[in-house]
Image: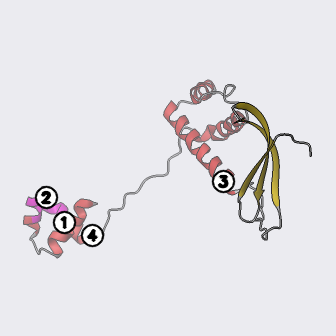
């Protein structure tokens, strides 16, 4: 594609002859003439629709990948093991084809999980002084040279998200 652009630029902008363009680019004059006559910006290559070796096994492999995704990481079969199992079923393709299929399948599954099944949520809005979150915890501090256990009250205001801490020697009033 870059060569096409160079040939067109040399002919249309720099006004070079076909012979000069052929000499500068190292392409035959017939090829230069053909590209200029075609009047296209990029070449069109026809790729035939061919059936992949993995197509007859695609549903089986997708089912296995779905089953394996539900298992814990240590219980899952590797892609090499899946390839070996496909070979026993008559698959004659390479491991790379199976690995590429698994990568594509996982990427599609991840995309689906990001866009569906996440549920609906309603953003929370709080007026000032309307609500807060409260919790207790224990912590230690050195008071008067002595290590003392303190009960900590944690308060988080919902509107401003401000955080307050208050220490008490005991949790009971």
Residue at the spot 67% in from the left edge and 28% down from the top edge:
76
Residue situated in front as seen by the camera: 116 or 98: 116
Instruction: Look at mark 2 in the image and give the residue it sits on.
Output: 25
Circle 4: is it few (<14), some (14-19), or many (20+) Cα within 10 Å? few
Per the image, the residue denoted by label 4 is: 38
* Residue ID for mark 1: 7
Identify the residue at image location x=64%, y=27%: 77
Going 71% across and 55% down the picture, which residue do you hit? 163
Marker disc for residue 35: none
The quarter of the picture where the N terminus appears is: bottom left
> Upstream in the sequence, badge 3 or badge 2?
2
Note whether residue 94 is visible: no
Q: Secondary structure at mark 1?
A: helix
| Mark in the foreground, 3 or 1 | 3
Alpha carbon distance from label 1 to label 4: 12 Å
What is the x, y in percent for residue 160? 71, 64
Mark identifier at residue 114 = 3
Alpha carbon separation for disc pair 3 and 4? 46 Å
Label located before the other in sequence (1 or 4): 1
User: Is residue 153 on the magenta stretch?
Assistant: no
Quadrant hosting residue 74: top right
Is label 4 in contact with label 2 (beta carbons under 8 Å)? no
Report if residue 140 is visible in the image: yes
Q: Distance of mark 3 from mark 1, alpha carbons?
A: 46 Å
Image-based side of 59 in relation to 28, left or right: right
Range covered by the magenta-colored residues: 21-33
For the residues labelled 2 and 1, say whether their Cβ atoms are less than 8 Å apart. Answer: yes
Mark 3 or mark 1: whose residue is earlier in sequence: 1
Label 3 neighbour load within 10 Å: few <14, some 14-19, many 20+:
few
Q: CA distance from mark 4 to mark 2?
A: 18 Å
């Amino acid at each position: 594609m870059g060569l096409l652009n160079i040939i067109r630029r040399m002919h249309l902008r720099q006004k070079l002859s076909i012979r000069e363009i052929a000499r500068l680019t190292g392409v035959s004059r017939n090829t230069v003439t053909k590209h200029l006559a075609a009047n296209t910006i990029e070449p069109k290559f026809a790729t035939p629709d061919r059936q992949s070796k993995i197509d007859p096994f695609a549903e089986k492999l997708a089912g296995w990948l779905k089953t394996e995704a539900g298992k814990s990481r240590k219980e899952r079969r590797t892609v090499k093991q899946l390839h070996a199992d496909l070979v026993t079923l008559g698959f004659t393709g390479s491991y790379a084809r199976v690995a590429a299929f698994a990568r594509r399948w996982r990427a599609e599954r991840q995309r689906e999980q990001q866009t569906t099944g996440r549920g609906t949520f309603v953003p929370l809005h709080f007026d000032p002084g309307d609500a807060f979150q409260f919790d207790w915890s224990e912590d230690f501090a050195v008071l008067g040279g002595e290590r003392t256990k303190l009960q900590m009250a944690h308060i988080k205001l919902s509107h401003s998200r401000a955080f307050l801490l208050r220490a008490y020697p005991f949790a009971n009033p």
